[in-house]
Amino acid sequence: MDLSFSAEDIAFREEVRAYLAENLPTHISDAVRAGDELTKEVMEEWHAILNANGWLATTWPTEFGGPGWTPVQRHIFEEECCRAYAPRIVPFGLSMLGPVLQAFGSKEQQDHYLPRILDGTDWWCQGYSEPGAGSDLASLKTRAVREGDEWVINGQKTWTTLGQHADWIFCLCRTDPDAKQQSGISFILVDMQTPGIEVRPIKLIEGGHEVNEVFFTDVRVPYGNLVGEENKGWTIAKYLLTHERTGIAGVGFSMQSLEEVKALARKVQRGGRPLIEDPLFASRVAQAEIDLEAMKITNLRMLFKAQQQGAPGPETSILKIKGTVINQELKDLARRALGPAAAPFPGYVTDGNLMFGPADSANNAARYFNNRKTSIFGGSNEIQRNILTKTMLEL
């Protein structure tokens, strides 16, 4: 397979680069560069800018309002957004639920929800993980019982990212408690304003608030909010997770982090010379760059396959594993380069005669600790290795 960039791809890259230079607000790129926690308003502002140009739902076909890009174009777009310090597009409605509705939703669901995802009317979150049902997701206990034309939902979801902002949540619920684990689950859409829903924040180790617990107590939902067939939600869940794990690879963001590490290592002095000249440190940077280049090619190969087959396959677990390992390695290298200055101090910090500004201190302990989660969410890396063993090696 020829994965080289064509003249059309190169022209597309220039188009994206020019668009970002003209349309990405400085206050947004500065906040991303500094590692600030972005507000909902900032994320919505960026989504609206992209949507005005038809570039928000990068994976959607044109018939549903997407740009209809090829896998290479999506890869280029992500690279250029990261290079320009644009925010990551919030994935829950656009990259997760959107493809699910297009593949499994009714015409009425597609016509109602997809435009509202694009224009920002509805902000979605994901109701998958539960206490005791994280990587072993099929053991979930949240129940949905049908009563007439309604579902009555009781249970708890956890690690619900950005749930404090969400208007809606897509949930996996057990609808047949007597069936085997994977066979008795349904995929249901729930309005977060429905009586009986409580959202409690979870404070992360670095002090941020991006995840939550969500409790359901006799929450009544219209039966028509079921996506696909009753008790067939596990098929939808797996389909969604393959899209999520492809995105978790974060190739563009790791490329951004690699350049930051190199810049820091050229600035920091150790033993009277730049850290980048230290053999041990330089070898770790080189290995990370080699791994990243290999993952870029693997990511493109899988995107091509997804385009041909309609969805990524179980091999996306490779991207999830390698992507998060590389990401964590780069954050660790940045932390080591900064040394004592990596502590999560606000504003400017000094190390001898060397001053680090906000762009440098974005690679601090808070960012390092926050990224420890990446090898756990979306299915822990240990679970991903099991998936690869069972589905690809047939062991």
Image (cartoon, rainbow, N blue to C red):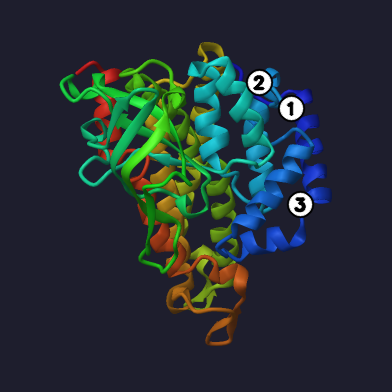
Q: Amino acid at mark 1?
A: Asp
Q: What SS does tag 2 mark?
A: loop
The span from disc 2 to disc 1 (Cα, nearest Å) is 18 Å
User: Image quarter for residue 2?
Assistant: top right
Q: What is the CA distance from the residue labelled 3 to the residue labelled 2? A: 24 Å
Mark 1 vs mark 3, CA separation in Å:
21 Å
| Residue on which the image places disc 2 | 61
Residue at position x 51%, y 19% in the image: 105
Is residue 31 among what the camera can see?
Answer: yes
**x then y, percent, for residue 365:** 43, 69
Q: Give the amino acid type for the residue marked by disc 2 in the picture.
A: Pro
Dot label at residue 31: none
x, y (%) of residue 366? 44, 67
Q: Nearer the viewer, residue 110 or 150?
A: 150
Query: Which of the marked residues, 3 or 2, is nearer the chain's N terminus?
Result: 3
Residue at left offset 32%, top offset 34%: 152
Residue 350 position in % (x across, y down): 55, 84
Q: Is residue 236 left or right of residue 394?
A: right
Q: Quadrant of the C terminus?
A: top left
Number of the front mark, 3 or 2: 2
- Amino acid type at mark 3: Leu
Image quadrant holding the N terminus, namely top right
Query: Which label was assigned to residue 9?
Result: 1
Residue at the spot of label 3: 24
**Depth check, front residue: 293 or 358:** 358
